[in-house]
Image (tube, rainbow, N blue to C red):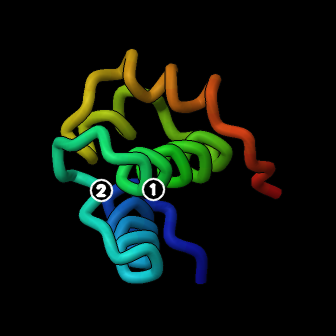
């Protein structure tokens, strides 16, 4: 059964990304591996149709940061 609630989906995705890449995506740092993890998180949620402001709030970032991530990411999400 697919999860429709943003909070549930974002929490599961955040856990998968943090466990896989061994980072805390809510940590306020500009180190490359943290930023790349946040970009992947934002790209997947945005591809699933979630709003930029929701994504930003979930990782304590500004919506402009998420827009920047989405324009700079170079991976394809199917």
Q: Which of 39 and 56 is in front in this view?
A: 39
Q: Name the residue under label 2.
A: 25
Q: Residue at x 55, y 52 (%)?
A: 40
15 w.r.t. 30: above or below:
below
Q: What element carries label 1?
A: helix
On the image, the x and y values in percent for residue 44 come to 60, 52
Q: Is mark 2 on a helix, strand or loop?
A: loop
Q: Residue at x 76, y 54 (%)?
A: 77
**Res. 17 image quadrant:** bottom left
On the image, the x and y values in percent for residue 2 come to 59, 75
68 w.r.t. 7: above or below:
above
**Contact flag, marks 1 and 2 (Cβ < 8 Å):** yes
33 w.r.t. 56: above or below:
below
Q: How far apart are marks 1 and 2 (CA)?
A: 6 Å
Image quadrant containing the C terminus: bottom right
Query: Position of 27 compared to 25: left or right?
Result: left
Q: Residue at x 64, y 37 (%)?
A: 73
Question: How many residues crowd mark 1 within 10 Å: few (<14), some (14–19), many (20+)?
Answer: many
Query: Position of 68 compared to 62: left or right?
Result: right
Q: Mark 1 points at which residue?
A: 37
On the image, the x and y values in percent for residue 26 come to 22, 52
Question: How many residues crowd mark 2 within 10 Å: few (<14), some (14–19), many (20+)?
Answer: many
Instruction: Tell me the number on the disc at residue 11.
Output: none
Image quadrant containing the N terminus: bottom right
On the image, the x and y values in percent for residue 57 come to 25, 37
**Res. 46 image quadrant:** top right
């Amino acid at each position: 059964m697919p999860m429709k609630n943003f909070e549930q989906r974002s929490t599961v995705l955040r856990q998968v990304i943090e466990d896989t890449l061994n980072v805390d995506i809510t940590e306020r740092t500009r180190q490359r591996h943290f930023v790349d993890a946040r970009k992947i998180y934002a790209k997947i949620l945005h591809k699933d149709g979630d709003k930029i402001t929701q994504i930003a709030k979930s990782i304590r970032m500004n919506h402009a940061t998420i827009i920047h991530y989405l324009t700079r990411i170079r991976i394809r999400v199917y």
